Amino acid sequence: MNLAARYEIIDAHKFPRSGAFVFSPNHYSEIDPVVMGVVAWKLGRLPRFLAKASVFKIPVIGWVLTKSGQIPVQRGGSVRGSEPVKAAQRLVEKGQIVVVYPEGSLTRDPDLWPMRGKTGAVRIALEQGIPIVPAAHWGTQHLMERYSKKISLFPRKTIRVKIGDPLDLSQFRGRSLDTATLNEATAVVMVAITALLEDLRGEQAPTERWNPSEHNQKETGRFEA
């Protein structure tokens, strides 16, 4: 990865060097986890990721994921499952970090802006009483385009990363973690990530965030939960 890309990390001092927290970047390339894993490693922390449970069944790879502390999540499930909750508790006890992409999958936005987020990141942060640190990166699409399986190694790419301030979610602590609360807190996270990406790109994001559910409804004319 160091041969394939150089990393320009802005505001690296905002990245906590100790203690448990949720690290939440934007997501638009299949190689994002590797890129942000390298960034976390360069900043002195060993990252843990939420990963699809099916990947853990692959010989050798599954063993490596398990031994390195990665967290399995059932496809179509959520962090409310017993294993993710237990894993999050272990992370807090050991002062480790977990990387959670609030969008849940690659953004569907045509211009790669962050789309509407899901609630997994804030649920972990609020249930475990740990902060969320937002981040944005830009340039990864030149290493691997969205939905592509091909990595472009040459020429060497430049990936710019900006770390945000740990988010203050105190207004949500003590409240019932119902859908409304989690969605409200997730919106705060997505606004922070988008602002960081605007700085990196030198552009302004669309005023209306891409909502996959609404887009599918418009295309198919049917309700999609």
Image (cartoon, rainbow, N blue to C red):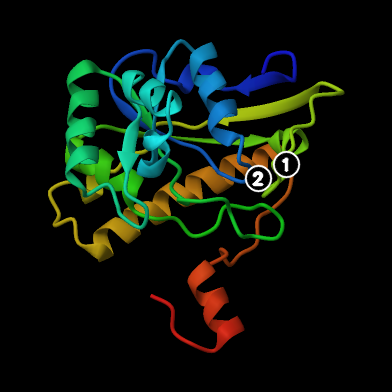
Residue at image point 28% right, 23% down: 20
Graded by Cα atoms within 10 Å as few (under 14), some (14 to 19) or many (20 or more), the crowding at tag 1 reads some
Rounded to the nearest angstrom, the CA distance separating label 1 from label 2 is 5 Å
Can you give x and y, in whole percent of width and height, for residue 67 in the image?
33, 18
Question: 3 above or below 87?
Answer: above
Work out whether 145 lies above or below 78.
above
Query: Residue placed at 68% from the left, 20% from the top?
Result: 8
Quadrant of residue 205 within the rendered picture: bottom right
Q: Amino acid at mark 2?
A: Glu
Q: Quadrant of the N terminus?
A: top right
| Residue 45 to residue 34: above or below | above
Type of amino acid at the residue the image marks with label 1: Arg
Q: Which residue is mark 1?
A: 201
Counting labels gives 2
Residue 165's spot in the image, x, y percent?
Answer: 44, 31
Q: Which mark is residue 211?
A: none
**Quadrant (top left, top right, bottom left, bottom right) of the C terminus:** bottom left
* Residue lying farthest to the front in this orientation: 59
Name the residue: 75% across, 20% down: 4
Which residue: 57% across, 52% down?
114
* Left or right of residue 125: residue 54: right
Q: Which residue is mark 2?
A: 198
Q: Nearer the viewer, residue 9 or 221?
A: 221
Residue 147: % across, % down: 67, 49
For this view, does 138 lie left or right of residue 127? right
Q: Secondary structure at mark 1?
A: helix
Marks 1/2 in contact by CB < 8 Å: the verdict is yes
